[in-house]
Amino acid sequence: MKILKVLSIIILVFIVTFSINKFMLSIERNKIVGYGEKIEIKGKNINIVEKGSKNNQVVIIDPGYGTTAPGLDFKPLMDELSQTYHVIAIEPFGYGDSDTIGSPRTVENITDELHQVIQKLGYTKYILCSHSISGVYSLYYLDKYQDEVTGFIGMDTSVPNQLEYTGNTFLPILRKWSNKLGLIRIASRIHPEWFMANNQYYTDETKSQIRYRLYRDFANVDNLDEGRHFADNWNKIKDLHYPRDIKKIFFLTKKEDKDKDWRYIETQNAFEKNNGKIYLMDGSHYIFRDNFMKMSQIIRESF
């Protein structure tokens, strides 16, 4: 009887959180304010945000998995870099203000769509700047479009052998229902830094806009499908290497003992052995949120 009572309470709580979440989504939908510029790719729109003079060297920023609104999240870094560069944040399908497309989120499709956007913008030479999982896509991209990329910037990017250490822990059904039941809404209020920008460099309105999109898109069709393709996409790049003849820098979050940190060891293997340079920094996986000024200075000195 006690077990049935506990289960009944849990089910009741979930019904309440589900209902509240659904109601809030209907309200928040009308509060979302668009931003950026739309580029048509494959009959759908990809959203981009551009900053800085078009006469300057171009930096293309590619987000990590599930970054809710890259064009807003990268704003402090983009504002700082745009003093020297022409900076473009490209939001893949299913991210930010881009459409969802529903086609498989394979490394081939993701990199092809990124390249199509850059082509439509008319850029033939640019620096590629990637965060997290985009490190996987960037390796594939660099292998295919090496003649166009003049430099690479990694921001706590994933490395080829990462799954050997972490395994593939992605569970689509868990991501989907944690969002539907409003658990992500609750968790983001308790630990906002886990899910979104939450420091003094972002206005309250920007934080709200990111939050609305988080609840709307956390488990959208493209987001879930990208997660399902993690292992396959990693396997396709595990034998690839960063080109030795382009400038490469990598920003990595600092751990207490770097010599025992597999991330540092694997980054050394991927970067330093191919003429890259690693910069260790304090902060979370979203290293650019708190370190954008220092990172911008290093980028200016490097490229």
Image (spheres, rainbow, N blue to C red):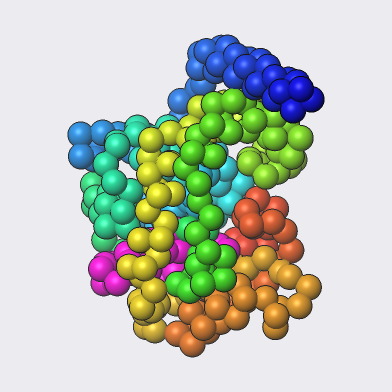
Residue in view at x 26 percent, y 33 percent: 44
Q: Is residue 184 above or below residue 243?
A: above
The image position of residue 257, as x and y in percent, is 76, 78
Quadrant location of residue 16?
top right
Residue in view at x 43 percent, y 33 percent: 220
Is 152 a magenta residue?
A: yes
Is 149 a magenta residue?
A: yes
Viewport quadrant of the N terminus: top right
The image position of residue 207, as x and y in percent, is 64, 32
| Left or right: 255, with 241 as reference point | right
Magenta region, residue range: 134-156
Residue in view at x 68 percent, y 17 percent: 12
Residue in view at x 70 percent, y 35 percent: 187
Q: Nearer the viewer, residue 294 or 259?
A: 259
Q: Residue furthest left?
A: 43
Total marks placed: 0
The image position of residue 96, as x and y in percent, is 46, 36
Quadrant location of residue 212?
top right
> Residue 103, can we see it?
yes
